[in-house]
Amino acid sequence: MATRDPLPFDPILRAAAIWDQRIGPSRTMAAVTSVMRVQQILLSAVDGALRPHGLTFARYEALVLLTFSRTGRLPMRVMGERLQLHPTSVTNIVDRLQADGLVRRIPHPTDRRATLVEITDTGSDLLEKATKSVTAIDFGLTGLSAEQETQLTELLGKVRKAAGDFD
């Protein structure tokens, strides 16, 4: 996954030691910097797995969300809420997916103000292939046991809850 030779030391731990000496306790800085670096690593891995399928992670997430719905379709407003995205971002994602024939917009049957987004057969087929690609690399998350992955999800969930992501 690394595109360069690894460093002979952990630069975040080195920065933390200097931070301790010059600024004060580095625990939070080291944790946040580590999360940010891991995010870069994971995005790079997932983007690399999705690129051959013509997808970004945002577009992949939207397709997955549609397949998680009972009918394979959702109102755009609900997509935005579930993906935690601004309506403009959802519109852009849906525009690109629709241009590629992976989803279609259809009128809401009971609310003329709403538009439903529905995954197409082509979208479902591509999603199946893309999912095989990202699961084959464990979404880029390597180096942890199954138990540690669960712990990581729980710990990050606490941060997300404290930030107001969910109740």
Image (tube, rainbow, N blue to C red):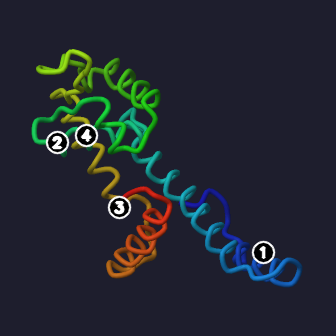
Measuring from the top left, give residue 163's x and y in whole percent. 50, 60
Name the residue beneath numbered marker 2: 69
N-term-proximal mark, 3 vs 4: 4
Q: Residue at x 16, y 42 (%)?
A: 69
**Residue 111 appears left or right of 11:** left
- Foreground mark, 2 or 4, reads 2
Total numbered labels? 4
Q: Amino acid at mark 1?
A: Ala
Is 167 displayed left or right of 88 in the figure? left
Q: Which residue is mark 4?
A: 127
Name the residue: 46% across, 35% down: 86
The residues tagged by marks 2 and 4 sit, at their Cα atoms, a distance apart of 14 Å
Q: Nearer the viewer, mark 3 or mark 4?
A: 3
Q: Earlier in the sequence, mark 3 or mark 2?
A: 2
Q: Are marks 3 and 2 in contact (CB under 8 Å)?
A: no
Identify the residue under disc 1.
Answer: 15
Task: Looking at this view, name the residue that lies furthest to the right.
Answer: 22
Give residue 167's mark.
3
Up/down of 162 relative to 98, above or below: below
Residue 119 horizontal/vertical position (percent): 20, 30
